[in-house]
Image (cartoon, grey):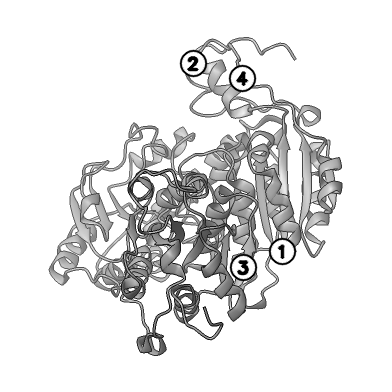
Amino acid sequence: MSASQYTVGDLVAEFLSRIGVTTAFGIVSVHNVPMLDAIGRRNAIRYVMCRGEMGGAHMADAYARVTNGLGVLFTSTGPGMANSIGGLVEARFAASPVLHITGQTATKFVDRDMGTVHDVPGQTAILAASGKAAYRVRSAGEALGVLTRAAAEALTPPRGPVSVEIPIDLQRVAIPRPAELDSLVLPVPPALPPAEAALDEVAEILARSKRPMLWLGNGARGARDGALALLELGFGAVSSWNGRGIVPEDHAMSFGALHGNGSPRIQSFYEGVDAMVVLGSRLRGHETMDFSIKLPRNLIHVDVDAAANGRTYPNAYFLQGDAQLVAQGLAKRLKGRIQVDPGFAADFREAKRQANEEYLATLGPYATFPAQIRAAMPRDALWVRDITISNSTWGNRVFEVYGPHDAVHPVGAAIGPGLPLGIGAAMGAAEGGSTRKTVAMVGDGGFAMNMTELWTAVQERARLCTIVMNDKGYGVIRHIQDAVVDGRRFGDDLRGPDLGQLAALAGLPHFKVSRAEDFGSTVKKALEVDGPTLVEVDMVAVGEFPPYAPYNTMGKHAERAQR
């Protein structure tokens, strides 16, 4: 083949550049070489070499969340594809727009179960079940159309990961360069406007409210202006764990993410709320204690997806439309009409103060950790977490987040994504030459699953401080076992490497915290380094973490396992 020929692999590389992609993640392999070769020759996209496809999928996911754009992942077919599934599933939980481009065996062998290299029967079905959609390019001529459809679908609310398979023989096919690339615009539909009559009806309901609130979810990330306009009219606000920072959480009328799960005071406060507008949240069972938290009966549910109507909590009214347009439309109609109880704001602020104090009091020796690290981090720093005790408690609930794209965590409650999520977030933070910092808090158990990605962070010089909360085991599981199997601990002890030696091997600075009062100052020192760092918190030295909700209320706890 002549070096001057334009192939489907070249089309993939140029397509990505034309739609604004500047960073992609993945691993080069036999079934994607032509595409990645084209990316390398064009030199227009930063290609981040992950150490595992699962890590790469999480990186693309976090990158998409932080940039509010498209995350791109390349994998090989078969085993490489399979390794990415956990990350794609998490991206689907988080509604992250990820375009996953993978190979496929040559077209003459595909779907025939002939045992060619990396041939996995049913690959398309696996990908379709793991994401929002999956497509296969079946001829060179349809490659641009399939890619355009897949990228647009990933970015269309409700967003999610979309996979495209391109058989290896088609990647090498020479084609005429499509002229439409010069003016390509993805057919992503505009924000869905709500019906004016529906806005009028909902405004009529809310105009009679005296103690109204907003519940802000992931679908409301673009609704800051509208939400703040409603807060100006007297509304209070609370956030789902995936909708944090839409309203800055130091706002006097925001509970932040202390939305009732683990806070009886907040649940009690809802009893006096006479209307709640849910903007872009599914009110997930994980966050509502399997729907046992009682929300106001007069609940208005707003979502772009009609299937959200009645999916979890019953509502008094369902309004389909973009969260920002709905919030702005309601604020416009309610201005001068709604008369909020004059005492509501004071009651709200006092409930917030007491609820935070009460929650911090449950953290034992870790009660000062949220304030310490918040003071150590720049206001615009990104806050990334894994599923670990510290995140399931204060990281999710009382650590303040200030921007709608500043917090990333495993929405699907998986353990292990924290480090690669941190790397992807750091790559997103660096877009446009920004020097923003990223802090990723993980447990030693989750860190073990993807620790090889430390070398990715080092190679990319990511401005990432990774905090390993090291309790030498699966701490979350220990609390669950204490609560539900009478304290019989099994499979919870985890032998791991000396983290100082591991950091030295990877070539990044290591800091260790052995006293609670040193946490914030140590993180601050790590953040002064222009590059990746590792902070280890010795939880054995600091002290045992108390059981947390709901596992602190499930009956008698057994004696602690032998230390």
Q: Distance of mark 3 from mark 4, alpha carbons? A: 38 Å
Sequence-first disc among 1 and 2: 1
Q: Give whichever of discs 3 and 4 has the lower sequence position.
A: 3
Q: Disc 4 or 1, which lies upstream in sequence?
A: 1
The three-letter amino acid code for the residue at tag 2 is Val
Residue shown at the point (35%, 87%) measured from the top left: 180
- Which of disc 1 and disc 3 is earlier in sequence? 3
Give the labeled residue for mark 1.
460
Give the residue number, with chain letter if any, for mark 4: 491
Residue at disc 1, secondary structure: loop
Report how far apart the C-alphas of labels 4 and 1 lie in the structure.
35 Å
Mark positioned earlier in the residue sequence (4 or 2): 2
> Marks 4/2: CA distance?
15 Å
The secondary element bearing badge 4 is classed as loop
Q: Dot 1: within a 10 Å radius of its alpha carbon, few (fewer than 14), some, or many (20 or more) residues?
A: some
Splitting the image into 4 quarters, where does residue 434 fall? bottom right
Q: Which residue is mark 3?
A: 47
Kind of residue at badge 1: Glu
